């Protein structure tokens, strides 16, 4: 997918702010481009918000052992955020070309552990975007 200059600029800013730690930079760019092109601003905003939540919860889940108190609550919140994220991602990818639809379906939208891990990587990138938004607001 061809990215506009604006989307490339946003990706560059996120990449610089994250010290080049983006994990799914091309997919993030595709999502931002599709969101801007087709007016899916609410979906993109939700992906940013849920992405930050998913990233933070995934870090918490890694730290906890299987008997930790509150683990079930964190797991339920994680699964709920995953479902919201998937729905918004599905809504955005529906406007993409066949290649985007097939790619996102196989990489993010299947009910597999691999897709969940890919979503966590993408959520990391959305979390970095959220951090950039927050730091920009504070200035």
Image (tube, rainbow, N blue to C red):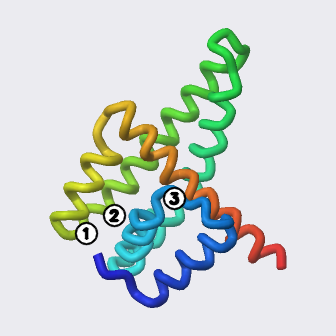
Query: Vertical placement of 28 versus 60: above or below?
Result: below
Q: How many marks?
A: 3
Q: Which one is nearer the viewer's eye here, 85 or 42?
A: 85
Who's the residue at 63% across and 61% down the image? 128
Q: Is residue 71 shown left or right of residue 42?
A: right
The circle on residue 65 is none
Q: Are marks 2 and 1 in contact (CB under 8 Å)?
A: yes
- Residue topped by disc 1: 95
Label 3 Cα crowd, 10 Å radius (few <14 / some 14-19 / many 20+): some
Q: Is residue 84 shown left or right of residue 10?
A: left
Q: Earlier in the sequence, mark 2 or mark 3?
A: 3
Q: Secondary structure at mark 3?
A: helix
Location of residue 63 in the rendering, given as x and y in whole percent from the top left corner: 70, 27
Q: Are marks 1 and 3 in contact (CB under 8 Å)?
A: no
Location of residue 88 in the rendering, given as x and y in whole percent from the top left corner: 40, 55
- Residue topped by disc 3: 46
Residue at the limit of the structure toward the top, as seen here: 67
Q: Marks 1 and 3, how far apart in space?
A: 17 Å
Image quarter in which the C terminus is found = bottom right
- Residue topped by disc 2: 92
Q: Marks 2 and 3, how far apart in space?
A: 11 Å
Q: Quadrant of residue 58?
A: top right
Label 1 Cα crowd, 10 Å radius (few <14 / some 14-19 / many 20+): some
Location of residue 133 in the rendering, given as x and y in whole percent from the top left corner: 68, 71
Location of residue 85 in the rendering, given as x and y in whole percent from the top left corner: 45, 49
Image quarter in which the N terminus is found = bottom left
């Amino acid at each position: 997918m061809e990215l506009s200059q604006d989307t490339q600029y946003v990706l560059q800013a996120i990449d610089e702010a994250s010290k080049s730690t983006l994990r799914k930079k091309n997919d993030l760019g595709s999502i931002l481009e599709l969101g801007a092109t087709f007016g899916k601003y609410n979906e993109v905003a939700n992906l940013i918000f849920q992405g930050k939540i998913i990233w933070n919860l995934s870090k918490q889940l890694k730290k906890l052992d299987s008997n930790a108190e509150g683990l079930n609550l964190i797991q339920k919140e994680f699964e709920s955020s995953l479902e919201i994220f998937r729905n918004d991602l599905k809504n955005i990818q529906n406007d993409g070309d066949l290649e985007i639809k097939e790619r996102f379906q196989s990489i993010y939208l299947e009910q597999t552990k691999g897709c969940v891990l890919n979503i966590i990587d993408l959520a990391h990138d959305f979390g970095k975007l959220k951090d950039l938004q927050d730091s920009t607001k504070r200035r």
